[in-house]
Amino acid sequence: MSPHIIDITQENAQQVLVEESRSRLVVVDFWADWCEPCKNLMPILEKLANEYNGQFLLAKVNADELQPIAQQLGVRSLPTVMIFKDGQPIDGFAGLQPETEIRAILQKHLPAPWEALIEQANALMQEEKFSDALPLLLQAYRESEEKASIGVGLAQVYLHLNRCDEAEALLDKVMMVDQDAAYEQAMALLKLKREAASSPEMKALEDKHAANPDDMETAYLLSVQYSQHGKPREALDLLLGLLRKNLNYEDGAAKKAYMDIVTSLGQGDPLAVEYQRKIYTLLY
């Protein structure tokens, strides 16, 4: 059984309903073998208990076997669900309810599932472990259906990693109503990063590459500049073009540079996944 789900017994009822509910919510599901709606409700509750990953404990009570507990808590029909906090029921419902309705009831009392991801990411950012924070914020951004404040935080991480294009794409999505102080700060940092990245060396190489796109040495040098100035996509595109012409260019230096950039992006990063797929297609 999941660590987030427990069966109530006479022996553990006091500990779960009173003691455990002082540290987190306990969702108590009263059910019975003969109750068909109970059998339809339980998988929904179990799914949510695992999804919320310990933010609440699902406690299952067989009302036939534990009639005194059910009677003491005033259970009159099955299924009945009660939400306990600090030893007292604070909410609940009777009968089979759709998942959307159960989620709405839980969300009144619980932080959103992605908030734990944001807390972990913020702790890593305090330690300047931005590469480690990135996948957590990406997941939170997706799970929150692209909540603007999370998008701004994600953009700030990208900026710390000198990945201006990804940061700018996120900031462009922020509606005017959500453009707060954190957004303005990120936009200012983006402007500074863009200005710092416009080095004379890069501009000269860009002009030379534009004049002669087949010059492999210029393309390689420009890819190095791009990788050092927060333009991983541009760097990878140039290196991929080189590898398509000569897989062992510069005794494998181009291939190594390509893989180093992909690795630096972090496991699970969408850009890394995209370019891993492209290099594997080329190699195999």
Image (cartoon, helix red, strand yellow):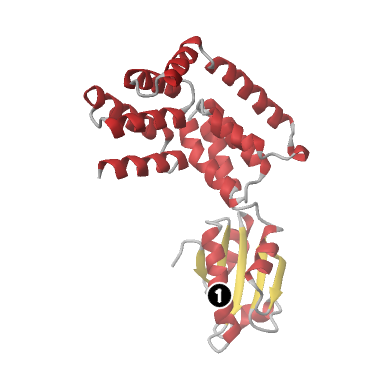
The image quadrant of residue 155 is top right
Left or right relative to 136: residue 25 = right
- Residue at the image position 58 percent from the left and 41 percent from the top: 119
Q: Position of residue 84 (x, y in %)?
A: 66, 64
Q: Position of residue 78 (x, y in %)?
A: 64, 83
Residue bearing mark 1: 42
Q: Position of residue 200 (x, y in %)?
A: 50, 10
Left or right relative to 227: residue 10 = right
Three-letter code, disc 1? Met
Q: Position of residue 120 (x, y in %)?
A: 53, 40
- Pointer 1: residues within 10 angstroms few (<14), some, or many (20+)? some
Q: Is residue 245 above or below residue 103?
A: above
- Residue at the image position 71 percent from the left and 58 percent from the top: 108
The image quadrant of residue 176 is top right
Q: Residue furthest top?
A: 200
Looking at the image, which is closer to me, 47 or 17? Answer: 47
- Residue at the image position 50 percent from the left and 68 percent from the top: 6
Looking at the image, which is closer to me, 274 or 78? Answer: 274
Q: Residue furthest front?
A: 211
Quadrant (top left/top right/bottom left/bottom right) for the N terminus: bottom left
Q: How many marks?
A: 1
Looking at the image, which is closer to me, 12 or 98? Answer: 98
Left or right relative to 163: residue 215 = left
- Residue at the image position 30 percent from the left and 34 percent from the top: 244
Q: Is residue 65 above or below residue 54?
A: below
Q: Is residue 248 visible?
A: yes
The image quadrant of residue 97 is bottom right
Local secondary structure at mark 1: helix
Q: Is residue 18 above or below residue 245?
A: below
Q: Residue furthest bottom?
A: 34
Quadrant (top left/top right/bottom left/bottom right) for the C terminus: top left
